Image (tube, rainbow, N blue to C red):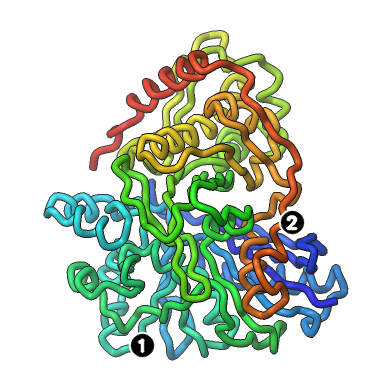
């Protein structure tokens, strides 16, 4: 039986997952890699470690399942999106560490760009707000500060890519320098209406077009891998959040999903129309398949599940991330404590790069359990901010929110989420929907699955969470949360 191999390259780990024709997982391998913090607010990855960790997981999952590369019908790739990599085309080596999507070093450059009056034009073309989150400012910084980078660009030797692009370059031994519509739409250099790199913006930023990859659809055969995966067609690419939207079968306008990963990302399908948000959400490409581009509204939370990692690694309150549910559940509520995890600023709908984390409401009776519960609840509060903004934008009502990601396994969190939203929250049986979406895109491109109808029935409900508190109670909780958020804003002005 042939299989689809999904390479899921995330912010803190790389994973490889094998899916069969029924969409069932046949094998998983995962490997964490270093998080590099050179200065406060700076976050980097070593591109060589990204590549090495991803290939180690691919080799491991084949070894543990006994599946040979000849049994792999296609490879699908999904990835952390806005992280920027620059490399030398001749040597194939990165010229510096990758600048991660969480990195805030370019906040001042972005503020200057906004002050110069470019925000409306950039949002109109790209669907994005000016922010250090996106790739363009990271590329500008590297061209200015990495020794020799501008010279390599002038010589036509420099290549830029998001992580999907870097992986494909490595997988094909440097033969392919490609990305897809979803990842291109996160760079702040791509015109989502014309489906092309935008020359006016490239000129404004001073980014040479020669460094950019060719943009392809999200589901097509781009080429074949070499090495350990020799001969396997690479046939699907999607940024992690768009891949999850596809994997959750959110194919109709109005359908929405939220992924609880390192950050949280709420996407709502808006169909073939790109909806411009009036509430500081993003318009983005959901995917491009068979010549049709579909769009989504997106809200991004920078620190979601990462707040649990902070409880583990920063405060030492737990030894393993999964222990947080027991610790938080040992108290009936937070005791009035609110934790705003603005460790790297606030994402949508606030977009405040100068916000910093705070814990409010501490008393002598506050315990580690109260702080843990406040940390978990902060994830749900931030997602509620996103959906409230989406509702205010006047799009289709969200009848239910489909959820996935590691923290979606936390029953208490997801129940609290339903309470705050006053909307049913649905968790599917297969929670690895990001990798599954990449697998679906690759399988559809190679005929592994003929049409979306072939995979529609594979999505099944694990549990449906109904709200247990009433609307006024939910609004009271959110009002107090917003007070805490206001105290966190504009804390760290350079």
For image coordinates 49% across by 36% down, the residue present is 383
- Specify the quadrant of the image occupied by residue 489: top left
Nearer the N terminus, badge 1 or badge 2? 1
Q: CA distance from mark 1 to mark 2?
A: 47 Å
User: Residue at label 1?
Assistant: 157
Q: Secondary structure at mark 1?
A: loop
User: Residue at label 2?
Assistant: 457
Number of numbered tags placed on the structure image: 2
Q: Is residue 97 above or below residue 307?
A: below
* Residue 54 drawn at (x, y percent): 64, 69
Q: Secondary structure at mark 2?
A: loop
* Residue 179 drawn at (x, y percent): 47, 75
Query: Dots 1 and 2: beta carbons under 8 Å?
Result: no
For image coordinates 22% across by 55% down, the residue present is 109
Say which quadrant the N terminus sits in.
bottom right
Q: Is residue 342 above or below residue 72?
A: above
Query: Is 121 left, or right, of 314 in this rendering?
Result: left
* Residue 32 drawn at (x, y percent): 64, 58
For image coordinates 79% across by 68% down, the residue present is 21
Residue 471 visible here: yes
């Amino acid at each position: 039986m042939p299989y689809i191999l999904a390479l899921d390259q995330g912010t803190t780990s790389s994973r490889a997952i094998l899916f069969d024709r029924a969409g069932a997982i046949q094998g998983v391998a995962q490997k964490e890699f270093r998080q590099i913090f050179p200065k406060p607010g700076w976050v980097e990855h070593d591109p060589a470690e990204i590549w090495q960790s991803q290939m180690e997981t691919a080799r491991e999952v084949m070894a543990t399942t006994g599946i040979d590369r000849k049994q792999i019908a296609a490879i699908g790739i999904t990835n952390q999106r806005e992280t920027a990599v620059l490399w030398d085309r001749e040597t194939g080596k990165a010229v510096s560490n990758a600048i991660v999507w969480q990195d805030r070093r370019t906040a001042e450059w972005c503020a200057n760009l906004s002050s110069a009056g470019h925000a409306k034009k950039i949002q109109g073309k790209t669907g994005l707000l000016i922010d250090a989150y996106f790739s363009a400012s990271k590329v500008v910084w590297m061209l200015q500060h990495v020794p020799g980078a501008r010279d390599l660009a002038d010589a036509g030797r420099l290549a830029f890519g998001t992580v999907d692009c870097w992986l494909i370059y490595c997988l094909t031994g440097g033969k392919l320098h490609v990305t897809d519509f979803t990842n291109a739409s996160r760079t702040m250099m791509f015109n989502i209406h014309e489906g092309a790199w935008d020359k006016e913006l490239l000129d404004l930023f001073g980014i040479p077009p020669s460094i950019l990859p060719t943009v392809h659809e999200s589901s097509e055969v781009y080429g074949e891998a070499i090495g350990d995966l020799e001969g396997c067609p690479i046939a699907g690419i999607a940024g992690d959040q768009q891949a999850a939207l596809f994997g959750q079968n959110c194919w109709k306008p109005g359908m929405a999903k939220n992924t609880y990963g390192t950050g949280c990302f709420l996407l709502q399908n808006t169909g073939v129309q790109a909806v411009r948000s009036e509430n500081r959400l993003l318009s983005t490409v959901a995917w491009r398949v068979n010549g049709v581009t579909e769009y989504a509204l997106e809200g991004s939370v920078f620190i979601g599940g990462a707040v649990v990692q902070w409880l583990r690694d920063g405060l030492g309150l737990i030894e393993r991330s999964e222990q947080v549910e027991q610790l938080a559940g040992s108290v009936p509520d937070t005791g009035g404590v609110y934790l705003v995890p603005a460790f790297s600023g606030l994402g949508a709908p606030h977009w405040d790069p100068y916000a910093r984390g705070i814990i409010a409401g501490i008393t002598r009776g506050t315990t580690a359990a109260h702080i843990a519960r406040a940390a978990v609840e902060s994830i749900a509060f931030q997602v509620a901010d996103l959906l409230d903004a989406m509702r205010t934008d006047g799009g289709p009502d969200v009848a239910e929110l489909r959820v996935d990601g590691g923290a979606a396994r936390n029953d208490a969190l997801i129940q609290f989420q339903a309470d705050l939203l006053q909307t049913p929250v649905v968790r599917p049986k297969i929670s690895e929907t990001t990798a599954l979406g990449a697998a679906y895109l690759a399988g559809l491109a190679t005929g592994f699955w003929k049409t979306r109808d072939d995979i529609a029935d594979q999505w099944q409900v694990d549990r449906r969470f109904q709200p247990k508190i009433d609307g006024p109670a939910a609004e009271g909780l959110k009002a107090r949360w917003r007070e805490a958020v206001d105290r966190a804003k504009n804390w760290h002005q350079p």
